[in-house]
Amino acid sequence: MQARLIEITPKAHDEIKRLAPGAAHLRIAVLRGGCAGWEYQIEFSTAQPGDVEWQDGEIRIAVDRDSVARLEGAVLDYQGGLSGAGFRFRNPHAQGTCGCGTSFKA
């Protein structure tokens, strides 16, 4: 385990606990794809060899080793509501986002 790379806001923390109580990990990666070149992948699964892991309250978080440079210092938030509810990243490495907001340019 090491220090956290990503800040998880209280709203995101509550939503993660609601969606997957007792999940092994919240695993986050950045993969090639989307309109702007990079997209986030969030899943509830076990950590993979080489992942960077830490604990945030009851939530265990794993970040894909190859994604660390594109995620370090990011904030994961959750926005509720009837339209557009979901997890959102505020990422200091993003130079721009696509029109639909699901991918970013780095």
Image (tube, grey):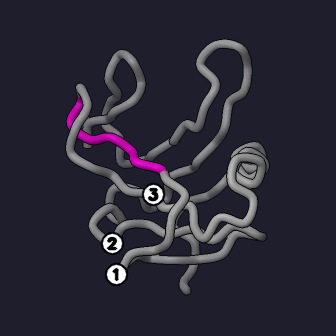
Asked whether 39 or 94 is in front, the reply is 39
Please give the residue where the numbered disc 2 appears in the rendered image.
65
Q: Secondary structure at mark 2?
A: helix
Q: Is residue 21 above or below residue 82?
A: below
Residue, x 44% and y 77% (percent of image)?
52
Asked whether 63 or 49 is in front, the reply is 49
Please give the residue where the numbered disc 1 appears in the rendered image.
50
The segment highlighted magenta reads: 36-42
Residue, x 32% and y 61% (percent of image)?
67
What is the three-letter code of the residue carrying label 3? Answer: Ile
What is the three-letter code of the residue carrying label 2? Answer: Arg
Please give the residue where the numbered disc 3 appears in the rendered image.
28
Asked whether 54 or 46 is in front, the reply is 46
Asked whether 90 or 31 is in front, the reply is 31
Q: Is residue 15 above or below residue 53?
A: above
Left or right side of 31 for 56 = right
**Residue 68 at x, y percent in the picture:** 36, 66
Q: Secondary structure at mark 3?
A: strand
Left or right side of 38 for 19 = right
Q: CA distance from mark 3 to mark 2?
A: 10 Å
**Mark 3 vs 2, N-terminal side:** 3
